[in-house]
Amino acid sequence: MAKAKSDPACGCPVAAFQKMISGKYKLRIVWDLKDGPRRYSEIRTGLLRGAGGSAEIAPRVLSRELKALAEAGLLDRKDFGVVPPKVEYRLTRKGKSFVPVIAAIRNWGMRHLAPVEMSDGMAAE
Amino acid sequence: MAKAKSDPACGCPVAAFQKMISGKYKLRIVWDLKDGPRRYSEIRTGLLRGAGGSAEIAPRVLSRELKALAEAGLLDRKDFGVVPPKVEYRLTRKGKSFVPVIAAIRNWGMRHLAPVEMSDGMAAE
DNA sequence: CAGCATCCTGCGTGATACTG
DNA sequence: CAGTATCACGCAGGATGCTG
């Protein structure tokens, strides 16, 4: 891989999509944010539901995904610039438009590959 | 990493989905197969559309993805067992049920992250 | 609290060669 | 034609420790 010279989207939306959501948490972050803005730690904590018992998420990783999503234009970073740091992330319009797609994915996933005992955030809709 | 002890689906359909389609070509393979069965080389060739100029796809990679998809129950491998080898891959019912999801993804992708000059297989829906 | 800096590791992926 | 075998590499992602 890593040819990364000329495949902004490869001419294929699917490939572009894959790139955009590459990373274990991206989809779930967006999904978590669909209910409203959240703070860094809230996202982090939320991601642990269903993490399978692994340790905590490395801040480096979460940070990276958040940044990538922001640069992809899916979400917006709001830094309050206060002393005890406070940062909120919220979906942009583009991000919101993406939620239904995730919903479709979740929907399919629950029907077809789910051992899935509903312990997830599925009470949402 | 490599916790891999108990996360068949992490309890999260989205995570399971990500696992299932992890791999650069999986989604596109399924998409390509939506029109009917295809042979190994056809898939390989088809995948090159939009490959961005990289060399050909390593057979090892394609092979692996195909196998994974088969084990995931999305597609079916049909070996004709003839002298000049001939193998066809076709979507299973489950695989077909997944096509609309990809369609949703493509649809969103074309609207939101597409440099996308319609050179793809978009005539589909 | 919200990160960034550093080290380390496994796996996905590419390239090439070989086989039934 | 449809793969498997082998070598090599980069990057995602985990674990710690530190900072503003």
Image (cartoon, coloured by chain):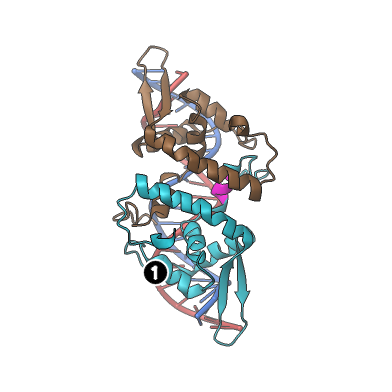
Chain colours: A brown, B cyan, C red, D blue
Image coords of residue D20 (percent x, y): 34, 18
Classify residue B71 as left or right of residue A41. right
Q: Could you tell me which residue is drawn at 42 percent across and 26 percent down?
A: A89
The relative height of residue D17 versus residue B103 in the rendered view (above or below) is: above
Q: Nearer the viewer, residue A64 or A11?
A: A11
The quarter in which the C terminus of chain A is drawn is: top right
The quarter in which the N terminus of chain A is drawn is: bottom left
Farthest residue in the top direction?
A83
Q: Is residue B22 visible?
A: no
Q: Which residues are magenta?
A: B15-19
Classify residue A3 as left or right of residue B29. left
Image coords of residue A58 (percent x, y): 50, 33
Q: Could you tell me which residue is drawn at 39 percent across and 67 percent down?
A: B48
Helix, strand or loop at mark 1: loop
Image coords of residue A98 (percent x, y): 44, 40
Q: Is residue A108 visible?
A: yes
Q: Could you tell me which residue is drawn at 35 percent across and 62 percent down?
A: B50
Indicate the amino acid at tag 1: Glu
What's the magenta bit mostly, secondary-structure-wise?
helix
Mark 1 — residue?
B56
Q: Could you tell me which residue is drawn at 31 percent across and 64 percent down?
A: B53
Is B16 covered by the magenta stretch? yes
Q: Nearer the viewer, residue B54 or A122?
A: A122
Is A125 covered by the magenta stretch? no
Disc 1: host chain:
B
The relative height of residue B120 versus residue A76 in the rendered view (above or below) is: below
Farthest residue in the bottom direction?
B83
Q: Nearer the viewer, residue A125 or B90?
A: A125
Classify residue A66 as left or right of residue B6. left
The relative height of residue B6 versus residue B93 in the rendered view (above or below) is: above
The relative height of residue B40 versus residue A16 in the rendered view (above or below) is: below
